[in-house]
Amino acid sequence: MRGTSTTRISLLEALGDQRGDDEAWGEFVRVYGPAVVDWCRARRLQHHDALDVTQEVLLRFWRASKQFRYDPRGRFRSYLEQVARSALVRWAEQAGEPHDQATRSLLESFPDREDLLTRLSEAYDTELLAIAMAEVKSRVKPRTWRAFELLAIARQSGAEVAAALGMEAGTAYVARWNVQRMIRATMLR
C-alpha cells in the first residue's frame, strides 16, 4: 500500500506480470467484482444478467491486463468504468434489449458514471480498511484489540467494555484511540 492512492499499484502490476498471479486475480475479482455487479443491478439488470456483464468486464480487463500499464496521472477506476459501460451496452445489444437514444443517454449519463466510480471506490476502501485492520490486529495485544472492537465497532459503552475486559474505562478508550491511530497510519502508507 503506497501513498494515499485509491488504486493499489502493486495489485495492477501483479495482474500485468507475464507469469500471471492467480492470487492477485482472486483479490481483483473480490475487490472490484461486487461493485460492478451492484452497479449493473442498479441499472435494473436481473441478478444473473448482472453477473454476466460483470464476467464480461472482468474478462475484458483480463485480456487487456498483459498490456495494461498503470498511469498514475489517470484513474484506474475511470478506465474500469469505461470497460463496464461498454460491456453493458454490448450485453444490451446481444440480448436484443431496445437501445434507443433514451436508453443510450441513460447508460451514458453523468450520475451513473459517478455511481460506478463511487461503488468501485467504496469496494476498494473497504478492502483497504480490512487489510489495515488485520495488520494492526497482528501488532497489538489481544486485549487492546478487543477494547477497540467493543468500543468502535460494537459501540458498547466504556463501562460495559471496562467490566467485560477487567480494565478502567479510560484505559479502554486509550486502547481504542491507539488502534484507530495505527489503522489510519497503516492506510496512509
Image (cartoon, rainbow, N blue to C red):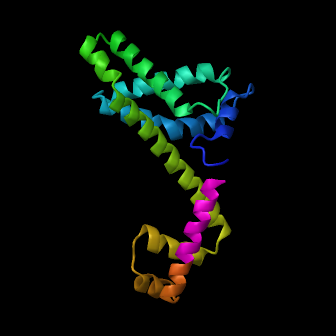
The picture quadrant where one finds residue 43 is top left
Q: Residue furthest right?
A: 19
Q: Nearer the viewer, residue 75 or 46?
A: 75
Is 87 situated above or below 136? Answer: above
Q: Is residue 40 left or right of residue 133?
A: left
| Camera-nearest residue between 106 and 123 | 106
From the viewer's perspective, is residue 48 above or below residue 167? above
Residue 77 appears anywhere in the view:
yes
**Viewed as shown, does residue 162 lie left or right of 184?**
left
- Above or below residue 78? Residue 185 is below
Magenta residues span 175-189
Residue drawn at 52 percent across, 40 percent down? 30
What residue sits 51% from the left and 89% below the top? 168
**Residue most toward the front?**
73
Q: Is residue 1 visible?
A: no
Quarter of the picture containing the C terminus is: bottom right
Quarter of the figure with residue 76: top right
Q: Residue drawn 57% across and 36% down?
A: 28
Q: Nearer the viewer, residue 45 or 67?
A: 67
Magenta span contains residue 124? no
Q: Position of residue 183 (x, y in %)?
A: 59, 62
Identify the residue shown where x is 43% and y is 82%. Answer: 158
Number of labels in the image equals 0
Position of residue 51 measured from the top left corner of the image (x, y, whole percent):
40, 28
**Does 112 appear above or below 63?**
below
**Residue 14 rendering spot, x and y as whole percentages:** 69, 34
Q: Position of residue 117 (x, y in %)?
A: 44, 36
**Would you say the magenta stretch is mainly helix, strand or loop?**
helix
